[in-house]
């Protein structure tokens, strides 16, 4: 998740000079004003990432409070991610129409109100509704911030700017598991949502006083038909995937949802070809770097998306650890991601995008598969080391995907690209949660287990690792020179 700064006249002048080399004396290759806005945007990202990790840690306790099966609690994650995927398509248009600062500020307010609602619910259905409200606010945070970044820096600065910006945001996943475990163990799970309130208030104040507004002069007409079709397509498809074979609803309802999802996807594709300004511009897939980054990145994210659901549950149910103990272990993956960010620029300059995505993808898959073989008898140091290494490798892969996707996107199509990429990004993470839960449920059914056991978690991690491994050969479809202007790989080779 890489975001950046905004501004009006000054940064827009910098945007015109996108092809000039970065000026000397800039920390991370971006201006002081850009760094200030990046930190402010990172405040909102910190809140969003903190929320996702503390909620994952609190799921078993919430399941007990609601009288629900732990394996069904993944809907608390899926509903939020589904709301992100449904509302993100409109983010680029809204930022151009109403101004990035206004949209970003409202998004923080909506997310904070959703957090208050989550802390007040008394049942799983109520939690799902409150999480959807949270997702509606969160949908505007990441793509709008990323859009501002891409409009403010030269292509040669994109990797450094994204890596520099996301470092504060990564603190959320780093402290989330232990904080969530501490709150659930010593207080109430409701507090994991209430901690968003002061962060949200601070974010609104910082955006109001320090972030300037930016919007496009010419804004296309809003694609209402496309917005409805894309929302229905994602909601129906994910509902069908989530409930199929789980006993939550009748199989015929799950099947009907999948048919509706497939039909509306086809309907959206037809509408996009007819629309002069489609909400999600599918013609962007004709750009090779964007297509490969999106396709391979989706396969990779499906595997990673299952981790926040499977890992805390394995540690708490399979290992018998408390929420606090679980959180103190799972934070190691985020620590590895935080350590990687300063190294991303140098690694991509040395290896290039294609080599990095192929071989780092293989190593990332292997590190995730190892997690499935964790057992209570393992030394704690070995578990920490495996999670730290896995977080480092996966974060490098995300930085490469998130930068390369925009390597060949013209500036006038940047809003459309950020909306489409962010939509697919969030949808793939949603599929990952559902895929991990489905594989866990299948293993339980085969083994005849009423509650998930350690072999079931092993099967779940191995299954998602197989999906994740497909991203590496997909990355071979891009040329060796892909993204050289961003990585600087060519200049180093010469």
Image (spheres, helix red, strand yellow):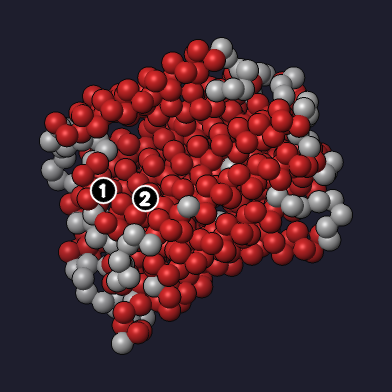
Residue identifier under label 1:
285
Tell me the quarter of the picture where residue 473 sits: bottom left
Q: Earlier in the sequence, mark 2 or mark 1?
A: 1
Q: Please, is residue 453 above or below residue 380 in the view?
A: above
Secondary-structure class at tag 1? helix
Residue at x 49%, y 67% (from the top left corner) = 359
Tell which of 8 and 390 is nearer to you. 390
Check disc 1: other Cα within 10 Å, few if <14, some if 14-19, many if 20+.
some
Residue identifier under label 2:
294
Residue 3, can we see it?
no
Q: Please, is residue 243 above or below residue 456 in the view?
A: above
Return the residue found at the far right: 377
Q: Position of residue 377 (x, y in %)?
A: 87, 54
Q: Position of residue 141 (x, y in %)?
A: 42, 44
Secondary-structure class at tag 2? helix
Separation of marks 2 and 1 at Cα, in angstroms: 9 Å
Q: Please, is residue 34 above or below residue 330 in the view?
A: below
Tell me the quarter of the picture where residue 403 sits: bottom left
Residue at x 40%, y 29% (from the top left corner) = 234
């Amino acid at each position: 998740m890489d975001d950046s700064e905004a501004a009006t006249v000054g940064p827009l002048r910098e945007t015109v000079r996108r092809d000039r080399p970065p000026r000397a004396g800039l920390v991370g290759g971006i201006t002081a004003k850009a760094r200030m806005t990046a930190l402010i945007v990172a405040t909102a990202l910190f809140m969003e990432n903190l929320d996702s990790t503390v909620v994952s840690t609190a799921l078993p306790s919430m399941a007990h409070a609601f009288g629900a099966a732990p394996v069904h609690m993944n809907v608390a994650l899926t509903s939020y991610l589904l709301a992100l995927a449904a509302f993100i398509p409109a983010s680029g248009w809204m930022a151009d129409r109403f101004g990035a600062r206004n949209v970003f500020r409202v998004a923080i307010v909506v997310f904070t109100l959703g957090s208050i609602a989550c802390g007040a619910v008394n049942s799983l259905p109520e939690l799902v509704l409150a999480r959807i409200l949270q997702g509606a606010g969160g949908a505007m945070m990441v793509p709008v911030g990323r859009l501002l970044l891409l409009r403010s820096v030269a292509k040669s600065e994109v990797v450094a700017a994204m890596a520099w910006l996301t470092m504060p945001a990564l603190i959320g996943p780093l402290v989330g598991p232990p904080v969530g475990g501490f709150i659930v163990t010593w207080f109430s799970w409701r507090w994991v949502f209430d901690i968003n309130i002061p962060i949200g208030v601070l974010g609104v104040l910082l955006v109001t006083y320090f972030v300037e507004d930016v919007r496009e002069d010419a804004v296309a007409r809003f694609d209402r038909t496309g917005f409805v079709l894309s929302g229905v397509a994602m909601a129906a498809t994910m509902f069908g995937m989530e409930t199929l074979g789980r006993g939550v609803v009748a199989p015929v309802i799950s099947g009907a949802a999948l048919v509706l999802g497939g039909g509306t996807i086809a309907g959206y594709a037809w509408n996009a070809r007819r629309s002069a300004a489609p909400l999600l511009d599918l013609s962007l897939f004709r750009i090779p770097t964007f297509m490969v980054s999106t396709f391979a990145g989706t396969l990779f994210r499906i595997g990673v998306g299952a981790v926040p659901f499977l890992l805390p549950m394995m540690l708490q149910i399979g290992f018998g650890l408390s929420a606090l103990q679980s959180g103190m272990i799972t934070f190691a993956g985020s620590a590895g991601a935080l350590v990687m960010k300063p190294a991303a620029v140098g690694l991509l300059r040395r290896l290039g995008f294609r080599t990095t995505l192929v071989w780092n993808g293989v190593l990332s898959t292997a590190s995730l598969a190892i997690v499935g073989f964790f057992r209570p008898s393992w030394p704690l140091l070995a578990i920490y080391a495996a999670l730290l290494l896995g977080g480092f490798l996966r974060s490098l892969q995300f930085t490469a995907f998130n930068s390369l996707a925009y390597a060949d996107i013209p500036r006038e199509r940047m809003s459309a690209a950020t909306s489409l990429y962010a939509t697919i990004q969030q949808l793939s993470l949603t599929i990952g949660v559902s895929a991990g839960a489905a594989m866990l449920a299948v293993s339980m059914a085969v083994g005849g287990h009423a509650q998930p056991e350690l072999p079931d978690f092993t099967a779940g991690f191995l299954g998602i690792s197989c999906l994740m491994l497909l991203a590496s050969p997909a990355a071979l479809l891009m040329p060796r020179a892909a993204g050289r202007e961003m990585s600087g790989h060519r200049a180093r080779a010469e």
